Image: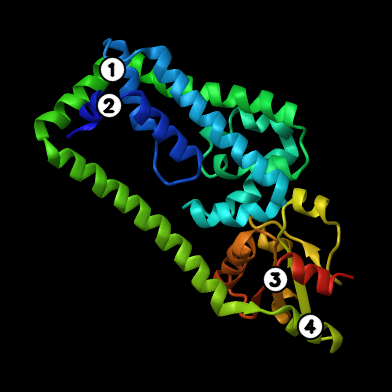
Amino acid sequence: MDLPDLLARWGIPLVFAAALAEQAGLPLPAAPILVTAGALAWDGALRPEAVLAAALAACLIADHAWFAAGRMRGRAVLAGICRLSLSPDTCVRRTDDLIARHGPYVLMVAKFIPGVSAVAIPTAAAMGIAWRRFALFDAIGCLAWSVAYVTAGMVFSRAVNDVLAVMAAVGGWSLVALAALLALYLGLKILQRRRLRHLYRLVRIAPAEVAEMLATEQALLILDARSSLARAEDARTFPGAIEFEVTANLELLPGDARDKILVTFCTCPNEASAALLAQRLMRAGYSRVRVLTGGSEALAALAG
């Protein structure tokens, strides 16, 4: 059974389920289903307003659920999202930077930015954005996302139908090929995350060890890799620490940095930004690099 057959059988409920699954954070892309549904709507097999309404409703339901979770649990909910999503955990930092620069307007385009859509809403909720503002900008974003894919299917219905015809001619092997491509994508994402976590396990350091180093005045430099938004929410810092972006030029480090133990830190899920910065430093030849564990708890224990 191919995609048109599935849509012919399940129709609008399938569109709703696909959109809801993607917006809930599952690694199941809804775009192919929405585009195909749009092409079928152009041919009269589905009602276009019903397709659009189903996608929009699913979007709004998922987004308001994430907003409620972010409002109740704050930034802690982001760790759960990053475990559910296959996007790198540094998507939290990227979203922080976007919201810090553009505010809730980001919600209007967040669904089109890979990695950002999964965490933009709980991040905005944790920032304390009013529900009315969220509802307005999110509704615009949901409508834009739904209209974009459904309209693309309608406008390019001939091309979509040609592709579907080829898939139908190939038969069940087309679904096997699509499944293989999806499996490859998921595998690469999982491998990427495992490599990062493996690095983190190799070079992590506990707050108690850092406290002992500070007490004995060892040559130590803490690099604060938190986003500007995270630092604004918690202005505490470590003694002698410097703010250092994950993508910053390493030449900006102090001249004696190679003679010190470099400890990277962030409050993002799984210490992802800190691990990525540590990876960059090690590749650049810095031999004594560590990732501070504990996130906010480490900050509370060591902040000056």
Inter-mark Cα distance, 1 to 2: 9 Å
For the C terminus, give its image quadrant. bottom right
Q: Label 3 is placed on what type of residue?
A: Gly
User: Is 144 in front, or is 250?
Assistant: 144
Q: Is residue 183 left or right of residue 96?
A: left
Q: Is residue 209 left or right of residue 272?
A: right
* The quadrant where residue 234 appears: bottom right
Asked which secondary structure carries label 2, the reply is helix
Q: Nearer the viewer, mark 1 or mark 4?
A: 1
Q: Which residue is mark 3?
A: 294
Question: Sequence-wise, which precedes: disc 1 or disc 4?
Answer: 1
Question: Sequence-wise, which precedes: disc 4 or disc 3?
Answer: 4
Q: Which residue is mark 2?
A: 7
User: Is 220 in front, or is 98?
Assistant: 98
Q: Label 4 is placed on what type of residue?
A: Ala
Asked which secondary structure carries label 3, the reply is loop
User: Is 46 in front, or is 129?
Assistant: 46
Question: Sequence-wise, which precedes: disc 3 or disc 1?
Answer: 1
Task: Please tell me which residue is depicted at 28% across the width and 10% down the height of the picture.
Answer: 44
**Name of the residue lying farthest toward the bottom:** 216
- Mark 3 Cα within 10 Å, few/some/many (few <14, many 20+)? some
Q: Nearer the viewer, mark 2 or mark 3?
A: 2
Q: Which residue is mark 4?
A: 219
Whether residue 272 appears in this view of the structure is: no
Q: Label 2 is placed on what type of residue?
A: Leu
Inter-mark Cα distance, 4 to 2: 64 Å
Inter-mark Cα distance, 1 to 4: 66 Å
Task: Please tell me which residue is depicted at 74% across the width and 37% down the height of the picture.
Answer: 101
Question: Sequence-wise, which precedes: disc 2 or disc 3?
Answer: 2
Q: Which residue is mark 1?
A: 40
Against 241, residue 153 (above or below) is above
